[in-house]
Image: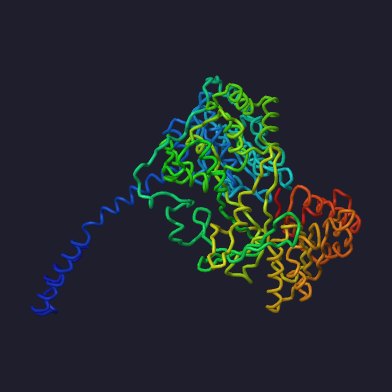
């Protein structure tokens, strides 16, 4: 620019007939000189930030290549995970760690962080292999972090010849599309020319996912050894991944206090809000829904004011609970540590994208309260690695046995850990010689996950609040200990005090496909016993809103179920008001224990078979089911099959196919859990 300006002045000097007077030229030159001086003075420091930006961005670009990373770090096994709740990620880390026992070097990888279109380049690395631990989520969908990889598989025609792979799927047999993502990944990689090193493994969370994984893994590694012609090294897999750093002199403003991503994000809240940046929603209402009985069912309202969070009826709200403070304190006492020590667990692999197992620096107390799952039963790998810290030979032997693939070991783990529901504190209490360093324990425990609830309100009606309907989990286990559900007990205690103080809940919204019909005139049939009523409260509110807007709203029919009319008829007043107002066309309630023979929602469906078949077959009705997947959802399925057979004259096979087609068309939707 300076040269251009000089050239401009030079050209003007050579003009035969000047258009400016001497004074004009003087003033112009003065201004130009000042501008040039200002320009140089101002521009001087700018190259430094430009260089900084360049330096910061370059590694990020390089790191998206898992191939280059494997070459650089001398790895030949990459284990990708599609994980929604952390289990698939945990399995992937275990497989990557196991690799060194077989003379190989592994790395676990999040497919969201890498360019999976490079998969065909894996053959550039000798004796290499990709393993995929793929969880199935929702209605046969890939997990959020595996969506891009799934889309790539569907659209690519890359040649994967020479690429060795294996797949372990994580699913639940109570769901319609059992292990769909794992099955598809295995099938598609073969279609693209990949070489399957070992058979597809299918883990069933409805039975014993841990046992399924152990059994598959014990056969997988010998097959890998045979395929690559390598021998087990005999080395122990108890190798630390993280080293402990104790911070004796640190500013507490630099210490994580429960934040999921950005440090101090709970002090200075900035949208948009998501899993890494949850919104601290004040609790406006927390009331008990049931009038009697020994359970506690609750209605909680979260305030969204100023959050810019939007949601639709049918979406889910995710909340980040904290562990019971008394359990955290007992762990600290049992291990004899100062829980307020500020620490970091630093990855020994400097090239790893995962620098810490949880946000660091933080205190042991914060880690055990906010970041680590201390309430659920530890998996076998945790027992195996902790066994070295048991001074009693018998206790050590039993811990190692429970982590083995032997039938005796599996039976012992099933009875002593699973059936007895021993969490890590119970194990430490019942094995007095076990004294692990707390930092190793923190390294091994899985992350405490967000809990998802079907939203019990409509964003059209309650734009500034989200409603939750939940039942508090609390019961006595076989060892006589009281098991308390982490999230529901934490929510139960979020009371609004008399002085107006409102506790907060870290939350974000997860979008769902569970949606009312696009056309309000379509009839809807909703089946939701117990807390399965939640999304339908939102649906009914929205149908009322549509009616108020002057829309032609179709029949709105609810099938609800509870134990006793006078105890747990949830939202009775609201539902009866909606029925009186003509918003709810029909309110059908099954009180399972108010008579000698139990009556459930599926019995009421069969009772109204003529009306239901007409609505479904002739009037384009949409069916929605919410609640327990293991029993209720299956029984409702069966009831609809029988209605189609009786009223539509279909064979059983035709009836099953009929409702599968409704699902494909989005006219039979489920929001179920097991």
**Image height check: is 102 above or below 181?**
above
On the image, the x and y values in percent for residue 70 come to 46, 34
**Image height check: is 37 above or below 232?**
below
Could you tell me if residue 197 is visible in this image? yes
On the image, the x and y values in percent for residue 627 come to 73, 54
**Image height check: is 421 above or below 573?**
above
Among the 4 quarters of the image, the one containing residue 86: top right
Residue sitting nearer the eye, 147 or 411: 411
**Image height check: is 497 above or below 228?**
below
**Which residue is drawn at the image coordinates 44% and 33% (left, top)?**
71
On the image, the x and y values in percent for residue 138 come to 66, 51
On the image, the x and y values in percent for residue 61 come to 41, 46
How many numbered tags mark residues here? 0
Residue 151 placement, left or right of 206: left
Residue 352 placement, left or right of 303: left
What is the image's colouring?
rainbow
Q: Quadrant of the N terminus?
A: bottom left
Residue sitting nearer the eye, 407 or 192: 407
Residue sitting nearer the eye, 586 or 102: 586
Could you tell me if residue 200 is visible in this image? no
Residue 37 placement, left or right of 92: left
């Amino acid at each position: 620019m300076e040269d251009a300006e000089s050239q401009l002045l030079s050209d003007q000097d050579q003009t035969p007939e000047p258009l400016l007077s001497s004074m004009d030229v003087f003033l112009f030159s003065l201004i130009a000189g000042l501008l040039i001086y200002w320009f140089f003075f101002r521009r001087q420091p700018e190259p430094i930030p430009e260089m900084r930006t360049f330096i910061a961005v370059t590694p990020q670009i390089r790191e998206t290549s898992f191939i280059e990373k494997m070459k650089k770090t001398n790895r030949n096994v990459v284990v990708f995970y599609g994980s929604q709740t952390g289990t698939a990620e945990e399995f992937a880390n275990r497989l990557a760690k196991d690799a060194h026992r077989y003379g190989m070097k592994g790395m676990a990888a999040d497919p969201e962080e890498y360019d999976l279109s490079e998969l065909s380049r894996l053959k550039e690395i000798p004796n290499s292999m990709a393993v995929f631990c793929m969880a199935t989520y929702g209605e046969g969908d890939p997990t959020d972090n595996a969506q891009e990889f799934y889309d790539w598989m569907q659209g690519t025609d890359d040649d994967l010849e020479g690429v060795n792979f294996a797949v372990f799927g994580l699913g639940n047999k109570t769901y319609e599309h059992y292990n769909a993502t794992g099955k598809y990944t295995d099938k598609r990689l073969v279609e693209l020319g990949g070489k399957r090193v070992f058979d597809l493994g299918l883990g069933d969370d409805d039975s014993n996912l841990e046992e399924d994984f152990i059994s598959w893994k014990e056969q997988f590694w010998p097959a890998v050894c045979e395929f690559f012609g390598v021998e087990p090294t005999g080395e122990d897999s108890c190798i630390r991944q993280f080293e402990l750093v104790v911070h004796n002199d640190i500013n507490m403003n630099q210490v994580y206090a429960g934040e999921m991503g950005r440090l101090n994000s709970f002090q200075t809240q900035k949208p948009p809000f998501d899993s890494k940046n949850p919104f601290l929603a004040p609790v406006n209402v927390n009331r008990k829904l049931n009038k009697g009985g020994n359970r506690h069912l609750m209605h909680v309202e979260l305030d969204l004011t100023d959050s810019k969070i939007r949601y639709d009826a049918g979406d889910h709200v995710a909340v980040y609970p904290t562990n019971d403070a008394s359990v955290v304190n007992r762990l600290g006492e049992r291990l004899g540590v100062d829980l307020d020590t500020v620490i970091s667990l630093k990855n020994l692999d400097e090239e790893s994208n995962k620098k810490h197992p949880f946000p660091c620096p933080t205190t042991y107390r914060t880690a055990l309260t906010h970041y680590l799952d201390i309430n659920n039963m530890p998996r076998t790998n945790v027992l195996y690695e902790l066994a070295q810290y048991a001074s009693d030979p018998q206790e050590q032997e039993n811990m190692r046995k429970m982590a083995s693939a032997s039938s005796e070991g599996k039976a012992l783990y099933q009875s002593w850990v699973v059936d007895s529901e021993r969490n890590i504190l119970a194990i430490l209490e019942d094995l007095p010689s076990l004294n692990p360093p707390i930092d190793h324990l923190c390294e091994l425990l899985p992350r405490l996950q967000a809990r998802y609830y079907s939203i019990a309100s409509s964003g059209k009606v309650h734009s500034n609040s989200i409603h939750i309907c939940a039942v508090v989990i609390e019961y006595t286990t076989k060892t006589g200990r009281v098991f308390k559900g982490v999230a529901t007990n934490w929510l139960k205690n979020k009371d609004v005090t008399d002085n107006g103080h409102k506790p907060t809940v870290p939350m974000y919204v997860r979008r769902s496909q569970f949606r009312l019909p696009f056309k309000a005139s379509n009839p809807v049939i909703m089946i939701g016993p117990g807390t399965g009523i939640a999304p339908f409260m939102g649906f009914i509110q929205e149908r009322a809103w549509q009616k108020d807007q002057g829309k032609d709203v179709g029949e709105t029919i609810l099938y609800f179920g509870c134990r006793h009319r006078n105890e747990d008829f949830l939202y009775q007043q609201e539902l009866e008001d909606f029925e009186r107002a003509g918003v709810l066309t029909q309110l059908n309630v099954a009180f399972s224990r108010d008579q000698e023979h139990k009556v459930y929602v599926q019995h009421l469906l069969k009772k109204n078979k003529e009306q239901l078949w007409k609505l479904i077959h002739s009037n384009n009705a949409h069916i929605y089911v919410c609640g327990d997947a293991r029993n209720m959802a299956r029984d409702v399925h069966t009831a609809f099959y029988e209605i189609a057979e009786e009223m539509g004259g279909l064979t059983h096979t035709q009836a099953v196919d009929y409702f599968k087609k409704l699902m494909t068309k989005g006219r039979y939707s489920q929001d179920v859990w097991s």
